[in-house]
């Protein structure tokens, strides 16, 4: 309605973006960049009318040609560190060196599950005609290596519904694939009976598998904790032998479950909460605070077993002024995604809590 009142010449090739009314827009391109970086703090007190292909104008003005290029050398180096960390974790489960870890199904199974998550994002992006980064940036942790994959929306979505659908598609597909792999790995574990084959399996503390209630309940349903503990009687107390795909699936559940939580502007959880409730909604902010406290509490409580939760929170933040770590706001950034997606968000958060809440 506002656009109609502005007169002729405003059509579907233009979009309204929320801007603070007190800002003097002398340099529109510089302001758009600042608006993207500080979009969480904007109040709906004014409108900026701009062409929907905002990136074209930003990248062609003010010598910012590379502003929305894919991640660079430093980011690629960090991604390599994340993969090395997972290879080292996999090798430690076999009590081998890191080179052995590169051949382990634990590493490649986790990469496959993250690829499934990225595939979900790409399918949603194609359906909604969004331009996104093809290859993600991996985020490392101190103990399990790869804990997250950061990607970016590089063109403005039509509305918040598209952003919500894009953000939710990846983790849901990733969790589903991880759970299926977990069941398959448990069934394979149950078929291993020869002592030499059992000794060759990766060994991990049972408490590590209990980091996820979903993992623990699946183990109890398809194999049984007592069976798992008795599989290798020569193992150290509290240590269990499992098929490598069980560990890959467990890590996949943790990684995809974490991505459902709002941490930074390009985390899937943050995209979902802001698109479902709008950037300035009190209810969305309140839910975000609760989930933040839950994540920190879990990270501190389970710090002796794994540092991955706290690593995820602090390492996913990135450089606050790096515009590549921010998405374009939707062309209609005023209206939330709607009550249906708000309900779905509640279901997804419940799933995330089940995945990350430890079993005692």
Image: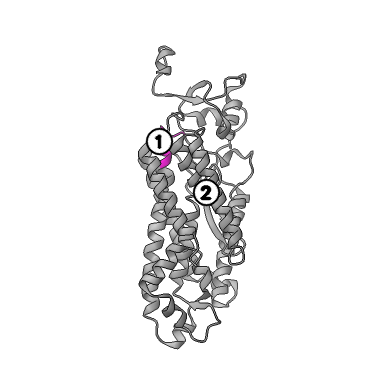
The scheme the figure's colours follow is: one colour
Using the image, determine if residue 239 lies above or below residue 173: below
Residue 210 in view: yes
Q: Residues within 10 Å of mark 1 (few under 14, many from 20)?
A: many
- Which region is colored magenta? 156-164
Mark 2 lies on a secondary structure that is helix
The reply to whether callout 1 and callout 2 are in contact (CB within 8 Å) is no
- Quadrant for the N terminus, please: top left
User: How would you rate the neighbour count of disc 2 (Cα within 10 Å): few for under 14, some for 14-19, many for 20 or more?
Assistant: many
Q: Position of residue 39 (x, y in %)?
A: 55, 33
- Where is residue 62 drawn, in percent x and y? 62, 27
The question of residue 159 being in magenta is answered with yes
Q: What residue is shown with label 2?
A: 291
Which circle, 1 or 2, is nearer the viewer? 2
Residue 215 colored in magenta in the image: no
Q: Is residue 226 above or below residue 256?
A: below
Q: Viewer-proximal residue, 70 or 332?
A: 332
Which mark, by number, is residue 79?
Answer: none
At x 47%, y 80%, the residue is 229
Residue 28 in the image: x percent, y percent?
58, 22
Secondary structure beneath dot 1 equals loop
**Residue 138 visible in rendering:** no
- Of the numbered discs in the image, which one, if any, rests on residue 337? 1
In this rendered view, identify the residue nearer to me: 298 or 15: 298
Q: CA distance from mark 1 to mark 2?
A: 20 Å
Which quarter of the picture shows residue 33? top right
């Amino acid at each position: 309605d506002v656009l109609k009142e502005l007169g002729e010449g405003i059509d579907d090739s233009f979009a309204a973006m929320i801007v603070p009314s007190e800002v003097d827009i002398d340099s529109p391109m510089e302001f758009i960049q600042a608006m993207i970086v500080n979009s969480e703090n904007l109040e709906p007190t004014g409108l900026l009318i701009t062409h929907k292909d905002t990136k074209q104008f930003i990248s062609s003005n003010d010598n910012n040609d590379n502003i929305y290029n894919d991640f660079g050398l430093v980011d690629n180096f960090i991604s390599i560190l994340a993969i090395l960390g997972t290879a080292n974790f996999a090798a430690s489960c076999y009590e081998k060196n890191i080179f052995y870890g590169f051949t382990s199904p634990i590493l490649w199974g986790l990469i496959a599950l993250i690829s499934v998550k990225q595939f979900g994002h790409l399918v949603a992006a194609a359906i909604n005609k969004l331009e996104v980064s093809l290859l993600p940036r991996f985020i490392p942790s101190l103990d399990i290596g790869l804990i997250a994959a950061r990607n970016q929306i590089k063109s403005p979505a039509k509305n918040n519904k598209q952003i919500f659908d894009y953000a939710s598609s990846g983790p849901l597909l990733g969790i589903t694939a991880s759970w299926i792999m977990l069941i398959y790995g448990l069934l394979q574990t149950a078929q291993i009976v020869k002592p030499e084959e059992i000794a060759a399996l990766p060994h991990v503390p049972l408490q590590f598998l209990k980091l996820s209630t979903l993992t623990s309940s699946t183990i109890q349903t398809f194999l049984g904790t007592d069976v798992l503990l008795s599989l290798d009687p020569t193992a150290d107390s509290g240590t269990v032998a499992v098929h490598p795909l069980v560990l890959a699936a467990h890590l996949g559940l943790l990684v995809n479950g974490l991505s459902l939580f709002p941490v930074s502007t390009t985390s899937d959880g943050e995209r979902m909460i802001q698109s479902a409730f709008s950037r300035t909604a009190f209810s969305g902010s309140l839910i975000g605070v609760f989930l933040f406290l839950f994540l920190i509490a879990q990270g501190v409580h389970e710090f002796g077993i794994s540092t991955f939760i706290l690593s995820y929170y602090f390492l996913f933040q990135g450089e606050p002024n790096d515009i590549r770590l921010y998405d374009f706001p939707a062309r209609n950034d005023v209206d939330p995604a709607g009550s249906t997606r708000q309900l779905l968000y509640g279901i997804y958060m419940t799933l995330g809590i089940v995945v990350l809440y430890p079993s005692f």
